[in-house]
Image: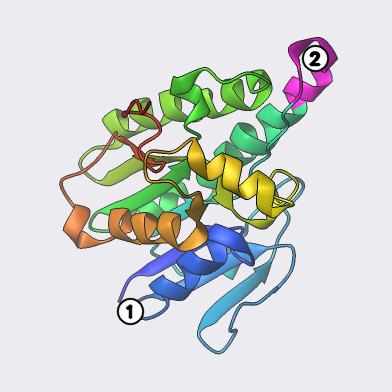
Amino acid sequence: MKNILLIGGSYGIGLQTARILSENNKVFVASRSVGDLDTNLITHISFDAATDTLSESQLPEVLDGFVFCPGSINLKPFRALKPEHFASDFKTNFLDMVTALQAVLPMLKKSKQASVVLYSTVAVTQGMPFHTSVSASKGAIEGFAKAFAAEHAPQIRMNVIAPSLTQTPLAEKLLSSDEKVEKAALRHPLKRIGQAIDIAQATAFLLSDEASWITGQVLGVDGGLSSLKIG
C-alpha cells in the first residue's frame, strides 16, 4: 500500500482523485477544509498552501506520491492585468507548489520510486486570449516538471496533466449556465467539457506502477482540443 499526499483535495479534481486512490492506498489530504472527504478512509491535515509549511510529524516517513491541486483561473485582457496579478497567480500556481514539494522531498526520496503529478492547462500550448497570466504561471509548471524529472530520475517520476475546461468549483463562473456549458463543449472534438473524474483517473494512473516508465511528460486530457482541428 502506497502513501500518497494531495495538497488540496477536498473538492473537485482533488476530491475525486483522493476517492479513487483511497481504494488501494493510504491517502493524506492537506487542505484548508475537510469538505466532502471521507475521513474514515482519508487522513485530513489542516493546511493552507498559501501560508503554511508542512511538518514531517504530520506525514509518514515515506511518501510514494505527491499531487498539487491548488490553482487559479484569472481570465482578463492583458490591459486589465497589473504586475501584482501576475505575481499572485505565479505564487498560487507555481511557488506554493515549490514550497510544498521541497518540504516533502526527503520523504519522496525514501520511496522505491515516487511519482509526482502537477497540473497545467491546455492554454499553455494553444495560445488563448485572456489567458496571459494563468498561461505564464502554468507554463512555468511544465518547464519545471521536465527539469525536475531529469534531475531526479529514476527515483522520482514527475508528470503534468494539462486539462481543458473542466466542471469544477474553480471553473463555476465560466460554466454558470447551460448555454455556457454547451458553447464550451462545442469547441472540443469530443463535444463535451471535462469532468473532475476524467482528470482524477489520469492522475491515479500516473501515480500507479502501471505508469512506471512515464516521466517528464505533459499529458493533454482535454477532449482533443490541443491536437485535433475540427470544422
Q: Which residues are magenta?
A: 76-87
Residue 167 shown left or right of residue 180 in the figure: left
Give the farthest residue toward the top: 79
Q: What residue is rendered at 69% in x and 56% in y?
A: 169
Calculate the distance from the C-alpha at mark 2 to the C-alpha at mark 1: 44 Å
Q: Residues within 10 Å of mark 2 (few under 14, many from 20)?
A: few
Label 1 neighbour load within 10 Å: few <14, some 14-19, many 20+: few
Write down the residue under mark 2.
Answer: 83
Which quadrant would residue 50 be assigned to in this image? top right
Q: Nearer the viewer, residue 56 or 32?
A: 32
Is 219 placed left or right of 132 in the picture?
Answer: left
Q: Earlier in the sequence, mark 2 or mark 1?
A: 1
Left or right for 77, reference 37: right
- Identity of the residue drawn at 47% across and 53% down: 67
Q: Position of residue 134 (x, y in %)?
A: 63, 27
Magenta-colored stretch includes residue 84 = yes
Q: Is residue 211 visible?
A: yes
- Where, quadrant-wise, is the N terminus in this rendering? bottom left
* Residue at 50% over, 85% down: 41
**Three-letter code, disc 1:** Asn
Q: Position of residue 203 (x, y in %)?
A: 38, 55
**Secondary structure type for disc 1:** loop
Please tell me whether residue 212 is drawn above or below residue 183 in the rendered image: below
The residue under label 1 is 24
Asked whether, in this view, residue 67 is left or right of residue 46, the answer is: left
